[in-house]
Amino acid sequence: MREKGIRVKEHTKMNQENRPHRRKQYFIKKRFQFRFILKFCLLLLGGVVISTALLFFLSKGTLTSSFRDSRLVIENTGSAILPAVIYTNLITLALISIAVIAVTLFVSHKIAGPMYRFESELREVSQGNLTKHITLREEDQMTDIVDELNAMIVSLHDRVADIQSHVDRLAETADAQGLPAETRDQLKQLQKRINDKFTL
């Protein structure tokens, strides 16, 4: 088991050295990334609305004096400061939204990239290709999961290869001992099915 783990890590390290270091496309899983960014922006918008409403509500019972057109005006503090608070919050919302979009796009890219790689590589494994080894960039998330998946693929490869070698030996023995043709045909069919279903 330890040997398999070492083999998986060595293979992964070799692949990391041989592949490009940058993923050029930032929108890999568009639907996932769009939802990820939208949730953060909606959370930010909700915070701005709550902040504005609380400020307006808490200043409701106070009065403020101001000059408008050379006249002294006394009015409710909430009504007086509401336009300035709304403008300030809108500008803040716009600036922070840009920062949030950039950060969440970067973070979601680190998650979406590995997810896309998992899907494409595991699709091949599910079709019987047991030579696959999933590799990620060093700075990507979920590298521990990759090690476990690679160990699983190596284990499956070894088990199927072991079954294949047993079937091959049985077929040779059947030929050598001159067993009935039906038995030899069945063993050959089994060999063919293993070769057709799996890439070792």
Image (spheres, rainbow, N blue to C red):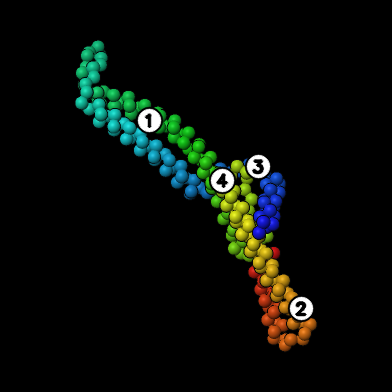
On the image, the x and y values in percent for residue 31 come to 48, 49
Q: Which of marks 2 and 1 is nearer the N terminus?
A: 1
Looking at the picture, which amino acid does disc 3 mark? His
Q: In which quarter of the image is the C terminus?
A: bottom right
Disc 2 packing (10 Å; few <14; some 14–19; many ≥20) = some
On the image, the x and y values in percent for residue 86 come to 33, 29
- State how far apart marks 2 and 1 are (Cα): 79 Å
Q: Quadrant of the N terminus?
A: bottom right
Pick out the residue farthest to the front. Answer: 2
- State how far apart marks 4 and 1 are (Cα): 34 Å
Q: Earlier in the sequence, mark 3 or mark 4?
A: 3
Q: Which of marks 2 and 3 is nearer the N terminus?
A: 3
Query: Could you tell whether 118 is left or right of 72 in the image?
Result: right
Evaluate if marks 2 and 3 touch, with contact meaning CB atoms under 8 Å apart.
no
Residue that label 2 marks: 172
Res 181 label:
none
Residue that label 1 marks: 90
Looking at the picture, which amino acid does disc 2 mark? Glu
Closer to viewer: mark 1 or mark 3? 3
- State how far apart marks 3 and 4 are (Cα): 14 Å
- Secondary structure beneath dot 1 equals helix
- State how far apart marks 2 and 3 are (Cα): 48 Å
189 lies above or below 140 = below
- State how far apart marks 1 and 3 are (Cα): 39 Å
Residue that label 3 marks: 21
Evaluate if marks 4 and 2 touch, with contact meaning CB atoms under 8 Å apart.
no
On the image, the x and y values in percent for residue 120 come to 59, 56
84 lies above or below 3 = above
